[in-house]
Amino acid sequence: MSEVAGDAAARGTRERIPVLYLGGMPRSGSTLLNLMLGQLPGHFEVGELFYLWDSGPLRNELCACGRAFSACPFWTEVGQVAFGGWDRVDVKRVLDLRQSVDRTLYLPLIMAPWLWPTFRRRLDQYTQLLVELYGAVQQVSGAEVVVDSTKRPSLAYILHRASGVDLRLVHVVRDPRGVVNSWSRQVPLPEGAGPRPYMLKRSAVLISRRWVTVNAMVGALAALRVPSVLLRYEDLVRDPQGQLRRVMALHRPLSDPLELAFLTDKGLQLASSHAVAGGRVRFKTGVLELRLDEVWRQQLSKSKQRFVEAATWPLRLRYGYR
């Protein structure tokens, strides 16, 4: 694996790769935002790149284009450009490497890797793989900006320290009661889209705690001078054009209103995508109605609503959720 990364690096240096990273708590609307951003000029969305190794070379799951990963011409070319082909990558070693560095538990070491030389060597190897992967996506797609909706805080901090990446951040938040309710439902997945037929369910206690910790860690990146935009799911649905203008300003201002022509009176006109992992909405085609999902008001019991409100109140109020 290190030889592959070294061979790729030896092909020549490149300018820093602009990566627009969506960070925050899963089930907060990041997939919807990702689909919108992928249609902006110069942007290419890849879904949740953290999970590429699992859903792609390891399990050969469906790309959002409808083909299996191994049959997708886009990802086949990306593997060729980045590593000389996916068959040249020892996926198990990559997964072991990712597990050894890309975890929230290791945030202190990601910020100060010199404290543990062995960790720093692994982190440098993993970072080099990411840079080569993002670079190949940029080259094959012809886009300027790679949009990654992984959301994980640890990966955002790794990209922040990557000299080959020009990181910009969209911090996506949603009312914690809506997030808890989404995690409490059994949501089916298209056949072949994941290792299980349903999306995972989690308890209100766990999701409330994670809503606070994940958003706090992602929000702290702004203090590290990462160019950032805080975007609420509810605002995105109510005013998608206004919110996309704010996000675009991270790289360049909107120059032509026609660049948002995919937002119609009927909703979001979906284009083809090669998102490798993410929410089930990435498989939809046609026009997606933009309708605010607040079913938690009816589906989440009053006792659970009160618990979530108490468990998340400091950040909840800071983000404007009453």
Image (cartoon, rainbow, N blue to C red):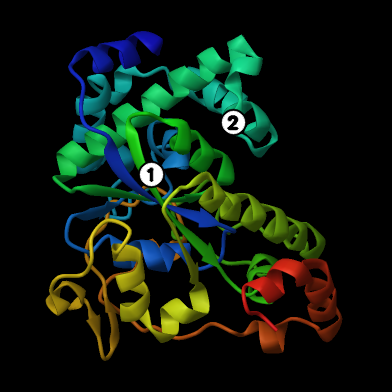
Crowd class of label 1 (few under 14; some 14 to 19; many from 20; radius 10 Å): many
Residue 86 at what x, y percent from top left? 30, 25
Q: Residue at x 22, y 32 (%)?
A: 15
Q: Is residue 247 left or right of residue 96?
A: left
Identify residue for label 1: 167
Give the crowd class for mark 2: few <14, some 14-19, many >=20 residues within 10 Å: few
Give the residue number, with chain letter if any, for mark 2: 111
Query: Above or below — where is 145 with respect to 179?
Result: above
Q: Amino acid at mark 2?
A: Met
Instruction: Say which of 100 and 157 sits in front.
Output: 157
User: Is 161 situated left or right of 71 in this image?
Assistant: right
| Residue at image location 59% in from the left, 58% down from the top | 25
Q: For residue 31, what is the image quadrant?
A: bottom left
In percent of the image, x 59 and y 84: which residue is there? Answer: 294
Secondary structure, mark 1, is: strand
Residue 317 versus residue 201: which sits nearer the camera? 317
How far across and how far down the image is residue 58, in percent?
44, 31
- Is tag 2's residue or tag 1's residue first in the polypeptide sequence? 2
In the rendered image, the vertical position of residue 282 relative to residue 244, given as above or below: above
Q: Is residue 42 left or right of residue 97?
A: left
Separation of residues labelled 2 and 1 (CA atoms): 16 Å
* Above/below status of 228 relative to 97: below
Give x and y (percent) for residue 277.
42, 49
Type of amino acid under label 1: Leu
Q: Secondary structure at mark 2?
A: helix
Task: Tell me the quadrant of the picture where the N terminus can be found.
Answer: top left
Residue 164 at x, y percent in the picture = 32, 30
**Vertical side of 282 occupied by 268: above or below:** below
Q: Which mark is residue 186?
A: none
99 left or right, relative to 105:
left
